[in-house]
Image (cartoon, rainbow, N blue to C red):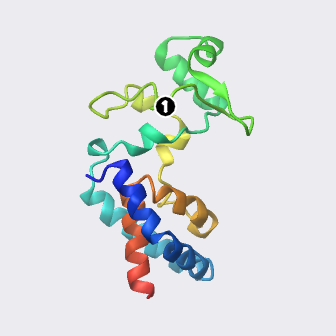
Amino acid sequence: MISPAELRGMMVKREAGYRRLAVKLKKFNKRTLDDKVHGLHDAFFAKYDCLSCGNCCRSLGPRITTTDIERLARRLKLKAGSFTEQYLRIDEDGDFVFKTMPCPFLGSDNYCSVYDARPRACREYPHTDRVNFYQIIDLSLKNAGVCPVVYEIFSTLQQTES
């Protein structure tokens, strides 16, 4: 599996091309783009094992919603206030995020100890199967430097659109 440092290095080399590609993709028919990206999402996730990677859990701090706090607190048998005090801080955007990175629930084997109650942002990451992908192309460009699947999706899109 590609290490976070290797992936960032690969992204540095391709970022300008991917940015040009993003401009083109935003002009695509929305349904066609969704179909293309969702097909690539399914194909690459059939080959990649997230447990062999864990880059996202090591480097991205998900936004934690009130619903996430309640679900996680219940899973850990804590009161919501205790969970918040122990695990969360407020970031520069005013959102709750984990106090520490990597994620406090990530094990050395890349398993999540609260997987069944994980935050919504974690459940939906890397968002490449989302409807209206055109709305998150810029976010996905950032994610391509973290998630090998997103990187592969952009690489494939670039090859087919060149």
Q: Quadrant of residue 133?
A: bottom right
- Number of marks in picture: 1
Return the residue nearer the eye: 109 or 67.
109
Q: Position of residue 157 (x, y in %)?
A: 43, 77
- The residue lying at 39 percent from left, 44 percent from top is 55
Three-letter residue code for mark 1: Met
- The residue lying at 47 percent from left, 29 percent from top is 117
Q: Position of residue 59 (x, y in %)?
A: 47, 41
Task: Name the residue carrying label 1.
Answer: 101
Q: Position of residue 90 (x, y in %)?
A: 69, 29
- The residue lying at 45 percent from left, 32 percent from top is 102
Return the residue nearer the eye: 146 or 120.
146
- The residue lying at 61 percent from left, 78 percent from top is 23
Residue 141 in the figure: left or right of residue 89? left
Q: Residues within 10 Å of mark 1 (few under 14, many from 20)?
A: some
Residue 111 in the figure: left or right of residue 141? left
Q: Quadrant of residue 66?
A: top right
Q: Quadrant of residue 137?
A: bottom right
Q: Position of residue 126 (x, y in %)?
A: 47, 53
Residue 46 in the figure: left or right of residue 130? left
Dot 1 falls on a residue whose secondary structure is loop
Looking at the rendering, in which quadrant would you find the C terminus?
A: bottom left
In the figure, 69 relative to 159: above or below? above
* Residue occupying the far bottom of the picture: 162
